[in-house]
Image (cartoon, grey):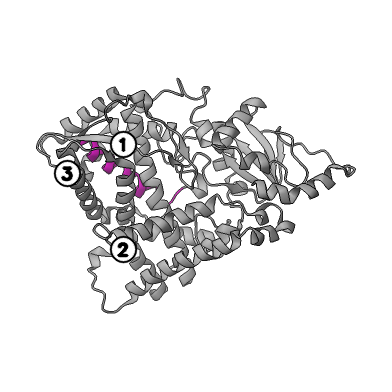
């Protein structure tokens, strides 16, 4: 950012000494002063935890909606359940597009996907495909054997450490498990004993995450797009895209190989997509770019968000030992003498669901959700919101709103017992998966993964912190990314429970 500001300084200096042209005063929300040309980019780029910075701005201006400028682009941030409902439900059609960006245009194959694509007829048809063929309840249930097998392998691995009272890097284990799960479910690949492939998988994921928060001048000041080439951002993006494209093409070639052995009941997501393409049985004519773009969405979202959520749940529990003991008591009394928790057991564990919901509330994996963009002029809280305005919904701030939540900074799963609140986007004080047209299509599968993994971790083991570390010492510092993970690894000592 320092390099970019040094490049911009002469231009900014020139603008500062120009006479301000008279413009019609717009009825815009309050917000911080901005510099000529770059607007508030310097503040956003140096904010650190962006959701926290934007929450402080909202408090400073005493407004649940604030306005900023990112170069030439207007930005609004909403930080109340009432305005979140307006954006995500009441005026969803006006607010449901996505802002275009250099990185996503490239990595999403010219917006052939569903996560990052602007709203369009093609997007609606792609969304139907994912809802009906990829993430239906029946399809998610078909992956149950994979979930249970992968979790058993993880439990066996942790048991070895528990036998010798070794410290376990639970962050690494959760990432490895989520990556292996999504690999088998989406691509039909099993990476458990292939460390080089797992490293490749992680590198691809890390590269993608890096691109999501790489600053491209072209996104905000198109006339200065040449700076991206000058500093090498475009070249790095091209290289990362080639790495990803090679990976997806390799997967497709494997699935098209007539010698590939496959049982019908083991059909993975890529098998389904190829079948839809070959049979021309979908509502649109799928092409390979559509398929690669969907693979990217599933690869990134499936591998990163589940592991992030699991670690936040376990972090919250280790910081609240009484809650952990209460949850373990529920699980162990319900499961009794089984060797592990099965999916059929999950509906009988209401406190588990309450704990996970409370963790999502305090530590949302996507604290600003994915950014939206307005497609037409709207009125929000009495202010004029114009087309092509970027919209952040500060889910982190909303889930800690003292006017909506009692004792919002405390970890209190009991608030969700006997409650009608759910995670399906109907309660706008808690929207970890978004809401409206843009709600996460993989929500059912994501919840199934998180609930089953956490339940087994707590059923099979008692957990404690390494010697000398107290619960209050465990940090909750976030790490920037598509999903905001815990910055420092969660290190715990497992002890086997019962006959496990």
Check whether the beta carbons of the residues at disc 3 and disc 1 lie within 8 A of each other. Answer: no
The local crowd at label 3, few if under 14, some if 14 to 19, many if 20 or more residues have their Cα within 10 Å, is: few
Which one is in front in this view, the residue at disc 1 or the one at disc 2?
Answer: 1
Give the residue number, with chain letter if any, for mark 1.
491
Give the residue number, with chain letter if any, for mark 3.
160
Q: Quadrant of residue 422?
A: top left
User: From the viewer's perspective, is 196 left or right of 111?
Assistant: left
> What is the C-alpha distance between the residues marked 1 and 2?
33 Å
User: From the viewer's perspective, is 280 left or right of 55?
Assistant: left
Please tell me which of labels 2 and 3 falls first in the chain. 3
Q: Residue at x 71, y 36 (%)?
A: 383
Which is more toward the observer, 233 or 369?
233
Which is more toward the observer, 459 or 497?
497
Q: Which label number is shown at residue 268?
A: 2
Please tell me which of labels 1 and 2 falls first in the chain. 2
> What is the C-alpha distance between the residues marked 2 and 3?
31 Å
Residue extending farthest to the top is 407
Image location (x, y in percent) of residue 192: 25, 57
Image location (x, y in percent) of residue 209: 48, 52
Q: Magenta span covers which residues?
A: 440-459
Q: Quadrant of residue 236?
A: bottom right
Residue 327, placed above or below residue 367: above
Residue 143, placed above or below residue 74: below
Secondary structure, mark 2, is loop
């Amino acid at each position: 950012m320092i390099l970019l500001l040094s490049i911009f300084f002469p231009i900014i200096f020139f603008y500062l000494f120009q006479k301000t042209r008279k413009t019609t005063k717009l009825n815009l929300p309050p917000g911080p002063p901005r510099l000529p040309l770059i607007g508030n980019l310097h503040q956003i780029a140096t904010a650190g935890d962006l959701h926290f910075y934007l929450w402080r701005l909202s408090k400073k201006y005493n407004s649940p909606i604030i306005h900023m400028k990112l170069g030439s682009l207007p930005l609004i941030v909403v930080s109340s359940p009432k305005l979140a409902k307006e954006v995500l439900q009441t005026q969803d059609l006006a607010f449901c597009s996505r802002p275009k960006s250099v990185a996503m245009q490239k990595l999403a194959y010219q917006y052939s996907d569903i996560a990052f694509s602007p709203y369009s007829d093609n997007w609606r048809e792609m969304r139907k495909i994912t809802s009906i063929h990829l993430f239906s309840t029946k399809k998610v249930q078909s992956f149950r054997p994979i979930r249970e097998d992968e979790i058993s392998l993880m439990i066996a691995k942790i048991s070895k450490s528990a036998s010798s009272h070794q410290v376990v890097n639970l962050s690494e284990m959760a990432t490895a498990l989520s990556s292996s799960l999504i690999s088998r479910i989406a691509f039909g690949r099993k990476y458990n004993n292939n460390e080089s492939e797992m490293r490749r998988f992680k590198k691809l994921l890390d590269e993608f995450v890096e691109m999501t928060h790489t600053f491209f001048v072209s996104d905000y000041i198109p006339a200065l797009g040449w700076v991206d080439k000058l500093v090498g951002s475009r070249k790095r993006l091209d290289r990362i895209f080639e790495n990803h494209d090679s990976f997806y093409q390799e997967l497709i070639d494997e699935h098209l190989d007539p010698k590939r052995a496959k049982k019908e009941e083991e059909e993975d997501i890529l098998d389904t997509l190829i079948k839809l393409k070959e049979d021309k049985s979908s509502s649109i004519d799928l092409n390979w770019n559509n398929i690669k773009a969907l693979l990217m969405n599933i690869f990134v979202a499936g591998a990163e968000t589940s592991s992030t959520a699991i670690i936040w749940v376990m972090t919250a529990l280790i910081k609240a030992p009484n809650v952990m003991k209460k949850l373990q008591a529920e699980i162990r009394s319900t499961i009794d003498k089984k060797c592990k928790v099965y999916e059929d057991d999950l509906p009988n564990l209401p406190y588990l669901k309450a704990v996970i919901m409370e963790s999502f509330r305090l530590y949302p994996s996507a604290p600003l959700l994915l950014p939206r963009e307005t497609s037409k002029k709207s009125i929000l809280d009495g202010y004029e919101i114009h087309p092509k305005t970027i919209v952040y919904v500060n889910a982190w701030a909303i889930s800690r709103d003292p006017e909506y939540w009692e004792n919002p900074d405390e970890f209190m799963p009991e608030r969700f017992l006997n409650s009608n609140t759910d995670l399906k986007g109907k309660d706008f004080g808690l929207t970890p998966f978004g809401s409206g047209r843009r709600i996460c299509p993989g929500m059912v599968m994501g919840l199934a993964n998180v609930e089953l993994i956490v339940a087994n971790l707590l059923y099979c083991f008692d957990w404690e912190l390494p010697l000398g570390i107290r619960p209050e010492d465990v940090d909750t510092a976030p790490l920037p990314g598509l999903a905001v993970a815990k910055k420092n690894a969660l290190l715990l000592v497992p002890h086997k429970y019962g006959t496990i």
